[in-house]
């Protein structure tokens, strides 16, 4: 096909379909290498932001957006100018935890309608093993009237970007690549090798590449679930979980996992994609789904701990001023998708508690649309009766325990719920605050 040579020579264009936390860094990376890049997204408002030099994801920064040569567009016909197309749209789950393939199906229809003979389409969206071949390729063929393997080729290269992580970036994370045949794999590998400084790792087929993604996140999910289960047991035993983990980590083969909320668009979702396909084949997960049950229940566990402590402090929780610090699914990241902090809020609401939520990273409009949460300012969080530190944003870390105690208006009769274990046990014991940490 010689697409790689044509891209490098500037004779062909590369296109990104989906310009979120995954697609935008990839688009900019290829543009930095001198390639002609088309950045497409259905969200015209998002495209307008990019055109104005704004980065709503905070992944690459406004300056990088302003300087890039990426051609941003919401016009799908622009994809007809590209021969190498990367699909990087989200793949969430439905309320019943079954895969929601609506975004990837829609993207496949768009790409198919504008697909040129001799093109390569690479999917990065997380899907279950077999989805690219069984769902996406038939759509491409139907919409384009072309035959996969003859008129165009398809690959799969799972995204591994960690939102908000400024150390592990696209360029220094090994990338899995696959293709429907040897020729397509060679082309795909050569193209990605342009931007992946540490190199790519080719695998034999699309299903294997799809499995790599869902399994690596399922593994993390299971390990965190184990730590969360320990935290729930240790809470009953009056043992500090983090002290146990610190001691365990002195051994060379300890894995270093800690308890916490498991949300976001990867770890909290991918296991369901894997178990869904396994169940279709007659296998019912013994471990993965139980890990999901544990992790999905942590919001309720934390909310119950807060209520218990408020009662212990002599408060009437329904009339207490409760402040929750953080709404995003992880620290120093504006992404609120599948945030398990929302589970804390939902469970508190069952007891008539309406917390004040502060998050300097989250978009207020998105927070209200996704969860019905109206974000407040730090000024609204003063004189609280209970503070729940749910996300370890740098702004919250910088407050330190003195800043939290000031927010509580003193410590006596007040409650601190330290979900992220930001404060030392001795430090907490030295204060008069009634505290609990995961």
Image (tube, rainbow, N blue to C red):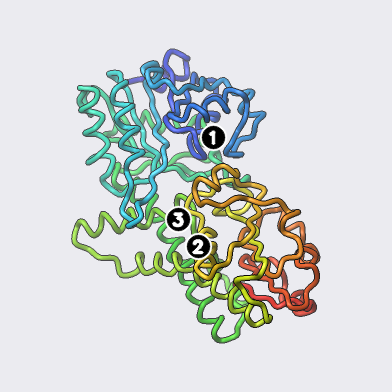
Q: Where residue 174 appears, x then y in whole percent?
A: 48, 44
Q: Secondary structure at mark 2?
A: helix
Q: Earlier in the sequence, mark 3 or mark 2?
A: 3
Residue at the (45%, 55%) spot, across then down:
267
Between 23 and 373, the one lying in front of the other is: 373
Q: Secondary structure at mark 1?
A: helix
Q: Earlier in the sequence, mark 3 or mark 1?
A: 1
Label 1 belongs to which residue?
25
Q: CA distance from mark 3 to mark 1?
A: 20 Å
Is residue 98 shown above or below 59? below
Residue 429 visible within the image: yes
Viewer-nearest of discs 1 and 2: 2
Q: Decide: marks 1, 2 in contact (CB < 8 A)?
A: no
Residue at the (76%, 61%) spot, across then down:
382
Question: The C terminus appears in which quarter of the rendering?
Answer: bottom right
Residue 167 visible within the image: no
Q: Where residue 34 appears, x then y in whole percent?
A: 54, 20
Disc 3 crowd rating (10 Å Cα; few below 14, some 14-19, many 20+) is many
Label 3 belongs to which residue?
267
Between 74 and 180, the one lying in front of the other is: 74
Disc 1 crowd rating (10 Å Cα; few below 14, some 14-19, many 20+) is many
Question: The N terminus appears in which quarter of the rendering?
Answer: top left
Quick one: which residue is furthest to the top in this view? 11
Is residue 258 shown above or below 13? below
Q: Earlier in the sequence, mark 1 or mark 2?
A: 1
Q: CA distance from mark 1 to mark 2?
A: 34 Å
Viewer-nearest of discs 3 and 2: 2
Q: CA distance from mark 3 to mark 2?
A: 21 Å
Is residue 150 shown above or below 253? above
Residue at the (70%, 53%) spot, across then down:
394
Label 2 belongs to which residue?
346
Between 314 and 33, the one lying in front of the other is: 314
């Amino acid at each position: 096909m010689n697409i790689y040579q044509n891209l490098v020579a500037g004779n062909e264009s590369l296109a990104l379909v989906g310009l979120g936390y995954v697609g935008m860094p990839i688009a900019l990376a290829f543009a930095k290498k001198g390639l002609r890049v088309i950045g497409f997204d259905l969200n015209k408002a998002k495209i307008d932001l990019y055109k104005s030099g704004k980065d709503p994801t905070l992944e690459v920064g406004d300056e990088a957006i302003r300087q890039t040569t990426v051609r941003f567009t919401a016009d799908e016909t622009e994809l007809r100018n590209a021969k190498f197309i990367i699909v990087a749209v989200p793949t969430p789950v439905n309320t019943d935890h079954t895969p929601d393939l609506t975004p990837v199906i829609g993207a496949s229809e768009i790409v198919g309608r504008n697909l040129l003979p001799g093109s390569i389409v690479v999917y990065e969206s997380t899907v279950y093993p077999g989805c690219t071949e069984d769902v996406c390729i038939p759509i491409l063929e139907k919409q384009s009237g072309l035959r996969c393997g003859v008129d165009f080729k398809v690959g799969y290269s799972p995204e591994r970007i960690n939102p908000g992580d400024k150390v592990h970036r696209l360029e220094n994370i090994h990338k899995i690549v696959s293709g429907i045949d040897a020729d397509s794999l060679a082309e795909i590998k050569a193209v990605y090798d342009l931007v992946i400084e540490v190199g790519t790792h080719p695998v034999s087929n699309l299903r294997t590449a799809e499995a790599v993604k869902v399994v690596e996140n399922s593994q993390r999910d299971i390990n965190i679930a184990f730590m969360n289960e320990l935290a729930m047991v240790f809470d009953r035993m009056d043992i500090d979980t983090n002290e146990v983990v610190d001691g365990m980590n002195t051994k060379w083969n300890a894995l270093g996992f800690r308890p916490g909320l498991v949300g976001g668009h990867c770890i909290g979702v991918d296991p369901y994609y894997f178990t869904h396909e396994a169940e279709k084949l007659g296998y019912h997960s013994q471990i993965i789904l139980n890990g999901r049950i544990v992790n999905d229940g942590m919001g309720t566990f934390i909310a119950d701990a807060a209520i218990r402590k408020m009662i212990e402090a002599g408060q009437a929780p329904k009339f207490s001023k409760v402040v929750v610090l953080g709404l995003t699914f992880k620290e120093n990241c504006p992404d609120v998708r599948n945030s398990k902090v929302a589970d804390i809020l939902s469970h508190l609401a069952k007891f008539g508690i309406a917390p004040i939520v502060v998050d300097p990273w989250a978009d207020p409009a998105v927070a209200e649309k996704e969860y019905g949460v109206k974000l407040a300012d730090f000024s609204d969080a003063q004189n609280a009766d209970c503070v729940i530190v749910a996300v370890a944003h740098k702004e919250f870390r910088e407050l330190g325990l003195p800043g939290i105690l000031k927010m509580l208006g003193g410590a006596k009769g007040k409650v601190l719920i330290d979900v992220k274990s930001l404060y030392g046990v001795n430090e907490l014991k030295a204060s008069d605050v009634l505290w609990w940490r995961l």
